[in-house]
Image: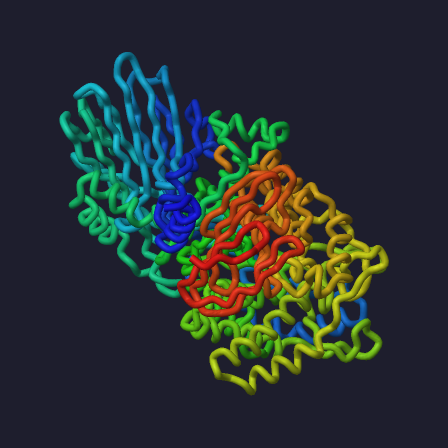
């Protein structure tokens, strides 16, 4: 068999079978450290979308901090304030009249009740106390991302200790295995604790039970977290152990293990949450049943079941950047990245983003929040909730191209809940049909404006509806489109009812605009005063234009609702055009106002460049140039997630070196030792946005064609990519050397005609479902 034939077979196998070959053929992606975590933000994160865990890896004391995705403050609650509808006409009148400052004085009456949302709460900690193990040697702590397994190894005297932990999705338990190289060398005390007030603890010979109920809490306004005055969710956590050798005895509310050779520990956690309207579940019974089922398996079986579930998902995509991997500890590599620019660390960062999304978001759990699924506090930053003016959406940017579609199921379920709660807000506060979402939501599916005047941004639901359409573009799954169509249609229905015609004398008289609204979190100067409120900001126009266009396409594909599609198209033609300001920038507001913070973290008005697709270099060159100018004026230094977004925007402009500059800053200055992103403080969206930006630098498919290496920076002259997804139902494999493509393969999951581009070369491929075509460096096709 020729070398060419062997390569073709290998590519086909890696793309179709989606085995772990792509990962194990190279060094497995891992984080590793030569010392225990000194603090929570250095710990190793694990999760299954329902349980999250942070392993600190101590020797004298091991701490495992644990979360459960439905443990939130408050309780079922409708945030909408019907009296807000009385203010709406006056707000609109003042804003159209150029009296935004006066309108802002009325805006407090248009906020939800309460005006801030509930927090995601820390759950509990598992502690293992080891006598006489404070001074180990040969210490190593690592996280294997291809397995989602964390390990701690060290030596004390002549005994080697090994600790291994994972969070199983199929069995919904945290699993830890402790072993020693000499029989009967494991002795420790196991306890549970919690930051929650009023916790009850009970220990038996093999189990510790933690239980309680979320207690009322008073929070200060500057925490951006609501207070609640009634007990909320009930919760339970059970930790159970099985010994080989040795014995146990109850010690207070913990268990003392003596002279064991190995120990398996299982933890199960649950709350009484059933859905956002019902909290009558039984966490005690749920955790007991979960442990009963998981406990029937030996450790080797639990591990095998975990790996059989997880490995195929993670192994779908592999990325190598550079010729070799730096073997030093991860924290040292991050510390030196500003000087080394190590490309293999960027590839590791990409895979960490995919890993963290799998850990944070799986079917049956809640979506990834501001901290994914990891939080140790009762008062986390910004409540660790779902912020919907960029952060929630950014969390799922890497899911499409990174082939992690299963992780999006909790997001689709959230949207379906928000359709219901948002319909009530639309009716009571706007007198409109459809559903609305403003800039935040929580476990109780809040959809009203919250926080402050900057909460009066009515297009969060539009953005999420557009994200559903994006999933259809990647999958070409008509069944999913049928499922998504009600949310897409009803988000558009709200905008058709809620938009108003700009009156004579305004900048866009006769056009349909949102009012009131903002450009997310940014302010402009009006008559010398800083204000948020406006009408028809650029981001709203871009989001609504895209959504109304999607309605027409979806109706045509599904053969339904053609009357509504025609109404949407007619409204789309009445939207204001995007404008270019006096500085050559894409205009953020309806008029060319001066920003109060020129280097603001948000770049919302550039949505149409990324993640949208209405602005492209070929089809709208003037707007693309204006978007570039906006990026230049905004500057590069910002929060972690904002740098990630800027990297993706520069990638869309095909400026790979500037996109890389943003990534380099992101890793060098806004990344913690365990690779978590900082806003600051810790916030997971930058990890996901950074991963998406890396993918966008290597493959783009938003403009009707698939572009290979469109924004390859000079810092990555050599690399290999396997399994990345592109719109239209394609899977791709690429290799490049000396900054140039050497070969590629394209696999189609759906029949169609696909345009593939590399530099100034292009090829049109007419492909059947299941067909794979290999391309050489000149894009000459060779079907496999």
- Would residue 210 appear left or right of 329 to someone viewing this image? left
User: Which x, y percent locates residue 33?
Assistant: 44, 27
Quadrant housing the C terminus: bottom left
Judged left or right of residue 293, residue 98 is right
Can see residue 237?
Answer: no
Q: Residue furthest bottom?
A: 563
Q: Is residue 287 visible?
A: yes
Q: Residue at x 16, y 45 (%)?
A: 296
**Residue at image coords 40%, 53%:** 12
586 or 375, which is in the foreground?
586
Measured from the top left, where is residue 354 in percent x and y? 46, 47
Q: Residue at x 67, y 55 (%)?
A: 760
Q: Nearer the viewer, residue 42 or 471?
A: 471
Farthest residue in the front direction? 2
Residue 766 or residue 478, whichever sits in front? 766
Looking at the image, residue 273 lies above or below residue 183: below
Which quadrant of the figure has residue 572?
A: bottom right
Is 662 rendered above or below residue 388? above
Query: Which residue extends farthest top?
Result: 157
- In this view, the residue in front, 337 or 213, is 337
Q: Quadrant of residue 665?
A: top right
Question: Measured from the top left, where is residue 352 in percent x and y?
Answer: 47, 42
């Amino acid at each position: 068999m020729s070398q060419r034939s062997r390569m073709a077979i290998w590519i086909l196998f890696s793309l179709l079978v989606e085995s772990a070959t792509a990962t194990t053929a190279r060094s497995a992606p891992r984080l590793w450290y030569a010392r225990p975590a000194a603090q929570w933000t250095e710990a190793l994160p694990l999760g299954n979308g329902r349980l999250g865990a942070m392993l600190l890896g101590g020797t004298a004391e091991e701490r495992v901090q644990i979360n459960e995705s439905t443990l939130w403050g408050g309780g079922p609650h409708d945030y909408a304030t019907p009296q807000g509808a009385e203010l709406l006409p006056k707000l609109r009148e003042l804003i159209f009249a150029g009296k935004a400052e006066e309108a802002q004085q009325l805006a407090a009456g248009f906020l939800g009740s309460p005006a801030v949302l509930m927090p995601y709460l820390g759950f509990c900690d598992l502690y293992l106390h080891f006598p006489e193990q404070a001074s180990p040697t040969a210490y190593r702590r690592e996280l294997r991302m291809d397995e989602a397994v964390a390990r701690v190894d060290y030596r004390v005297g002549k005994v080697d200790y090994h600790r291994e932990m994972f969070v199983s999705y199929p069995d919904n338990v945290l699993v830890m295995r402790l072993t020693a190289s000499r029989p009967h060398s494991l002795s420790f005390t196991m306890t549970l604790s919690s930051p929650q007030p009023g916790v009850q603890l009970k220990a038996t010979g093999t189990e510790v039970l933690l239980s309680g109920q979320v207690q009322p809490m008073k929070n200060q306004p500057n925490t951006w977290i609501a207070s609640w005055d009634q007990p909320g969710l009930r919760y339970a956590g059970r930790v159970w152990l099985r010994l080989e050798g040795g014995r146990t005895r109850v010690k207070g509310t913990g268990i003392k293990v003596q002279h064991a050779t190995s120990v398996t520990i299982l933890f199960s956690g649950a709350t009484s949450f059933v859905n956002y309207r019902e909290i009558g579940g039984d966490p005690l019974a749920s955790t007991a049943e979960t442990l009963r089922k998981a406990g029937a398996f030996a450790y080797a079986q639990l591990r095998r079941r975990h790996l059989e579930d997880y490995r195929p998902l993670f192994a779908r995509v592999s990325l190598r950047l550079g010729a070799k991997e730096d073997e030093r500890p991860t924290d040292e590599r991050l510390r030196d990245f500003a000087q080394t620019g190590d490309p293999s660390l960027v590839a590791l960062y990409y895979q960490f983003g995919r890993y963290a999304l799998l850990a944070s978001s799986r079917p049956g759990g809640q979506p990834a929040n501001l901290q994914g699924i990891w939080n140790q506090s009762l008062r986390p930053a910004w409540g660790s909730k779902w912020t919907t003016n960029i952060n929630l959406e950014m969390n799922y940017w890497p899911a499409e191209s990174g082939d992690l579609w299963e992780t999006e199921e909790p997001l689709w379920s959230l949207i379906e809940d928000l359709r219901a709660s948002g319909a009530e807000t639309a009716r009571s506060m706007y007198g409109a049909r459809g559903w609305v979402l403003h800039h935040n939501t929580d476990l109780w599916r809040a959809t009203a404006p919250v926080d402050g005047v900057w909460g009066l941004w009515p297009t969060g639901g539009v953005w999420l509806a557009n994200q559903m359409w994006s999933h259809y573009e990647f999958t070409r799954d008509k069944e999913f489109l049928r499922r998504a169509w009600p949310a897409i249609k009803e988000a558009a229905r709200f905008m058709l009812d809620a938009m108003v015609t700009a009156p004579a004398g305004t900048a866009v008289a006769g056009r349909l605009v949102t009012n009131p609204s903002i450009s997310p979190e940014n302010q402009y100067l009006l008559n010398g005063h800083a204000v948020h409120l406006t009408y028809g900001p650029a981001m709203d126009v871009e989001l609504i234009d895209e959504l109304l266009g999607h309605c027409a396409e979806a109706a045509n594909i599904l053969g339904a609702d053609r009357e509504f599609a025609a109404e949407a198209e007619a409204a789309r033609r009445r939207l204001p055009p995007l404008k270019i300001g006096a500085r050559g920038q894409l205009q953020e507001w309806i008029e060319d106002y001066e920003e109060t913070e020129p280097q603001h973290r948000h770049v919302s008005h550039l949505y149409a460049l990324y993640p949208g697709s209405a602005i492209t270099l070929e089809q709208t060159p003037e707007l693309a140039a204006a978007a570039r100018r906006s990026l230049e004026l905004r500057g590069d230094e910002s929060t972690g997630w904002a740098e990630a977004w800027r990297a993706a925007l520069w990638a869309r402009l095909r400026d790979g070196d500037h996109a890389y500059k943003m990534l380099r800053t992101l890793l060098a200055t806004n990344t913690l030792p365990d690779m978590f992103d900082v806003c600051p403080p810790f916030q997971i969206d930058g990890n996901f946005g950074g991963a998406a930006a890396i993918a966008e630098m290597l493959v783009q498919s938003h403009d009707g064609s698939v572009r290979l290496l469109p924004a390859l920076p000079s810092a990555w002259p050599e690399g290999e990519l396997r399994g990345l997804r592109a719109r239209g139902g394609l899977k791709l494999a690429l290799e490049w050397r000396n900054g140039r493509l050497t070969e590629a393969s394209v696999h189609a999951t759906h029949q169609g005609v696909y345009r593939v581009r590399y530099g100034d070369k292009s090829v049109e491929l007419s492909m059947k479902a299941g067909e794979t075509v290999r391309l050489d460096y000149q894009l000459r096709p060779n079907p496999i």
